[in-house]
Amino acid sequence: MKERILELISEIEKFNNIIKKNHLFYVNYKNNEFKLLGKSESSAVILASILVNSYTCIETLFLKISKFFENSLRKDRWHTDLLAKMTLEISGIRKKVISNKTHLILLELMKFRHFTRYYFEFEHDWDKLEFLEKKYNQLFPLLDKDILDFKQFLDELIKMDS
């Protein structure tokens, strides 16, 4: 069991590093290219891509955690189920992975990701993008704390297994 937990911790660290790299890319984009492009179609596509890629990376991390703890997910709504299950503390099994506040922000990003999969136009609603960008910026300190807390829980599991 200890080896499996250590592997999960490595997966969490790997994905957390990617999440942080995506955020750094966003910060660099806002400080450089966005200032040149302004609110253009090109800058909207870039921002939408950052939001979607970041959410997809976070969701993939949650899927790894979910599989480790053998959470069942309904096939027709697995994306929503996955996010909801990450807020559950399962007595004797695991602590919750994310807070309710983190969950609400991620729901907004998930809805946007689903929308962009079927939206083939380049015209984006800047009001919506700015709302999502605000949520995205609120997410990082919350998610960082949630991931740190969950890794500490996994460290405690290792100590109990030894």
Image (cartoon, grey):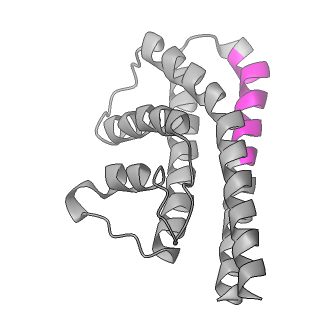
Quarter holding the N terminus? Answer: bottom right
- The percent coordinates of residue 34 (x first, y second) are 69, 18
Magenta stretch encompasses residue 31: yes
Residue at point 31% right, 65% down?
73
Q: Is residue 87 left or right of residue 28?
A: left
Viewer-closest of 66 and 26:
66
- The percent coordinates of residue 65 (x first, y second) are 54, 67
Viewer-closest of 93 and 144:
93
Q: Main secondary structure of the magenta part?
A: helix
Taking 17 as reference, is 103 above or below it? above
Taking 159 as reference, is 122 above or below it? above
Q: Is residue 27 left or right of residue 65?
A: right
Which region of the structure is painted magenta? Answer: 20-34
Q: Is residue 155 left or right of residue 121?
A: right
Q: Is residue 66 left or right of residue 75?
A: right
Residue at point 35% right, 53% down?
79
Asked if residue 146 can be seen in this view, the reply is yes
- The percent coordinates of residue 19 (x first, y second) are 68, 48
Quarter of the image where one finds residue 119: top left
Magenta stretch encompasses residue 99: no
Asked if residue 10 can be seen in this view, the reply is no
Taking 5 as reference, is 3 above or below it? below
Residue at point 55% right, 37% down?
102
